[in-house]
Every structure is written in structure tokens, then in C-alpha cells.
Amino acid sequence: MTGRQRPGIDLHIDIGTGSDSRARSIEAALRKAVASGRLPAGTRLPGTRSLADDLGIARGTVVEAYTQLAAEGWLVSVTGSGTRVAETRPSPTQAGPRAPVQDLVTRQLIDLRPGRPDLSMFPRALWATSVRRALAAADYHSMDYGDPAGLLALREAVATYVSRARGVQADARAVVITSGFAHSLALLTHALRHCGAGVIATEDPGLAHHRRIIHAGDLGTSPLPVDAQGADPACIAPGAGAVLLTPAHQHPRGVVLSPARRAAFVDWADARDGFVIEDDYDGEFRYDKRPVGAMQALAPDRVVFAGSTSKALAPGLRVGWLVLPARLRIAVLDAMAAMGTTVGAPDQLALADLLDRGDYDRHVRRARQSYRKRRAELSARLATQTNVRLDGVPAGLHTLLPLSSQQEEKHLVDAGLAAGVRLMGLHTARYWHSTERDGGGLVLGYATPPQHSWRHALDVLARVLDGAAVTGW
């Protein structure tokens, strides 16, 4: 092996002994491996020289096969990054054998679905520095199994942060570190069931995934209709033992829970010996005024405050937190022990360092400025395309474009996919508890595209809406 060569990546493919040419045999084998899922999207393939050596064939044969598969949309070749399996599979018309190269176009879908930040903004350098600094300063006990509630350093940092930035009443004893809101909700469902709850009332419309988590924990759900004032406490089912709310920026409608209704939910919890779960969804991102403070401060013994780094940093970090009433702490920690899911010590130490040094706050401010601009640009563009006003306040990472019907929603979702943009609808994503609804809507996640493609994403969305007679509720 020369100094320029590197060991190849192992890949098992069977090119057979039939009458097809070697290149066509390689193509067929790779198509089958990708279509069956044996080679998932993003998988890096061996270099052409390495695979040719492994198969005992000429390098040009492998180059021919790779070139054809890239033209068909099965593979993506990037200079300096090698050849990988494409993120999206080709359509049936593209997937046919030996389709003419000049007639095939590989495209990446623009993602305007909600719930994700711009991952290109993740502060890699700051995070890497925090990891190095925190590990250098940590004692060896930090790498033990430790407290299931989380490392004290992070619990203290979170308590300080949410008290300062969100107005939460918290100290380290009330904080439990989780691997994100979904994990937090699963823990709470387990704890509430053991405290006697049978039903959790959830917002309608609201995230279907949250209802699935609750049902998986053997609790029922009941709908809380949402209007311009937020979820309606007058509609809490008689048997509910808890309510799940997104009061800072309701998902998906984007409205803020009014002060009167916040007080009414707390009064209900006091009267029924129940609990309010406050999902601080988008709580750090308000653009027209200061963010609304946390509901938890009204009744720390009745309201569970749940936050995470998923929108501020990245969902892939899998770090979140609960600020718990004392009555729920033991039950939640028992659930944590039963599930056996905790956040790794290095990530906890790094996040504590990021919070303590103020780098987390500075990153949130930078992200807030970027998303504020995007939201304004989206609103201005839609004003020229439709006569429909966006629902909700300027905040968060998504907005709702109300539509007159399910049919209109489905048409636009399908038209978006054909144009190369992924859109999410209220009905297609099962936001409603019941499908018996007249209206529809597009939940537009304007934070997801990387900055360099944001304007292009706006242009594609405008083309999808152009000519459509969009009418709201």
C-alpha cells in the first residue's frame, strides 16, 4: 500500500455469475441492498479502487456502476466526502434499470416541517470547548453511575438558568435531568399513574406523539379545545388527574395561554388535587416582546416545568429537565430507575459549563435574531400569496397557516412534495384528537432549513401557494 492509499470500507455484495456485465451486476446488487434497507441512507460506500480490489475487477467497472446509480438517485457523490447512499430514494420511474443519465435528476427535499432548529447553527466550537474544559475539571466520581436525578453540577446550572430566564421557582433538589421532553413525559406518565391519575387532558390540536406516549404508559387522554386564548380549562374531563399544556407558544396554533386561563388551570389543580405539566415549548423564542414567564411560578407545588435543549441547541443532544413538585419527585425517580435511561456524564458536564459561562444564553440570543428575521420574511411573503392571516403570535420555530378544509390541506401537502418541499398538515400529522374537523392548516417550520437555503425554501413555498385559492378558517 502506498503512502496515499488508505484501508477501504468493507462491503459485502454478491455480483453473481450470470450473463449480465459486471457493472450491471454491481448496480443490481447495490439497488437491492439500498431498497431492502441493508444499506441505510447516508451509508458511506467503499472507494472505487478499494471495491474493485475486493471484487477482483477493473476499477473502471466500479466507476461505471457508481456513476449510473448516482444518476438514478440511489447514490450521492461529493468531492472530498466519497460516495454515500442518498437520503431520499428515487421514484419508481427513476429506479428502473439503466434509465438514460440525461433524463434523471437527483434532488434534495426542502424540509419545512416544524419542531427542529437550524442544525447548521449548532455551536460546535463552543460545545467542543465545554466538553474539553468540563472533562479536564471533573473528578473521576463524575463517571460513576451517580444520582439518577442527574449530576449536581447540571442540576444547579439548570435551576439557576430557568429561574433567571424563565421565572421558574427552582433549586437543584427539584430538578431531574432527562433525555428530552418525550422522556420527561414518559417518566411523568409513569409517576402520575402510580399517584392515581387515569387520564391526562391534552391540547386539541396538539402533538399526536405526546398522546401516544401517554397511552403507552397506560393512561388515557381527553381533548382540551384551543382557541385564541389557549387551551380551555372549562373543558377538562371530569376524570382527568393532570393536564398537559404548551402555554408559552401553543403547538401548533402558536397562541399564548391567557393569564385568566393560567389561573383557572391552577385553581383546577388545587381543587382536584391534580397537576399541570408545563411543556415550555418555544419559551425562549418570542419576537414581538419579552418571552412570557413560566406558568410554574404561579404554583410550584402543582405545576411541573419541563424544558430541553432540543430547540435552543439540537434535538440530537437528548438533554432535558424537569422541575418537580416535591410530591412527584420520588415517583419520577422510581420511573427513571425502572426505565434505566439517563444522560451521559460528559454531556451533562458540558451543558453545565455552557450554562454557567453564559454561552448558552448568547447562543439563544443569536438564534432568536435569526428566527425573528425568518418569521418576518415568511409572514411578508405569505401576505403577497394569500389573504389568510397566520395564526398565533410571532414566536417559536413554527407558524400555522389556516386552511378552509382537509382537502385543501392535502392538496397543498401533495403539491409541496411534488415541488420538492416537505410540508406538515394538521390532519396529515394527526394533530386533532378527532378527524371530524372542517378546517385544516399547514404547520410551517421556518427554522429547519440551513441559512444558505432559506430564501430558496421561501421561493419554493411561494410557488406551491401561487394560484391556490387559500382560504382560512
Image: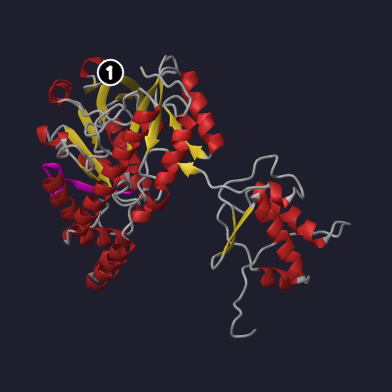
Residue located at (69% from left, 44% from top): 94
Disc 1 crowd rating (10 Å Cα; few below 14, some 14-19, many 20+) is some
Pick the front one: 463 or 264: 463
Name which residue type carries label 1.
Answer: Gly
Which image quadrant is residue 75 in?
A: bottom right
In this rendering, is residue 198 above or below 86? above
In this rendering, is residue 162 above or below 299? below
Residue at the front extreme, as displayed: 384
Q: Position of residue 165 (x, y in %)?
A: 14, 46
Check disc 1 and report the residue beneath it. 239
Residue located at (75% from left, 59% from top): 26
Q: Position of residue 158 (x, y in %)?
A: 19, 51
Locate residue 81 relative to residue 178 in the image: left or right: right
Q: Position of residue 141 (x, y in %)?
A: 25, 67
Residue located at (53% from left, 30% from top): 415
Count up the numbered dots. 1
Query: Which stretch did the figure color magenta?
Result: 166-179
Q: Please tell me whether residue 170 belongs to the stretch shown in magenta.
A: yes
Instruction: Judge whether residue 314 can be spotted in this image.
Output: yes
Q: Position of residue 27 (x, y in %)?
A: 74, 55
Q: Please tell me whether residue 50 belongs to the stretch shown in magenta.
A: no
Pick the front one: 184 or 278: 278
Instruction: Judge whether residue 32 can be spotted in this image.
Output: no
Where's the N terminus, which quadrant? bottom right
Pick the front one: 59 or 224: 59
SS class, disc 1: loop
In this rendering, is residue 220 above or below 192? above
Residue located at (25% from left, 35% from top): 394
Which image quadrant is residue 142 in?
A: bottom left
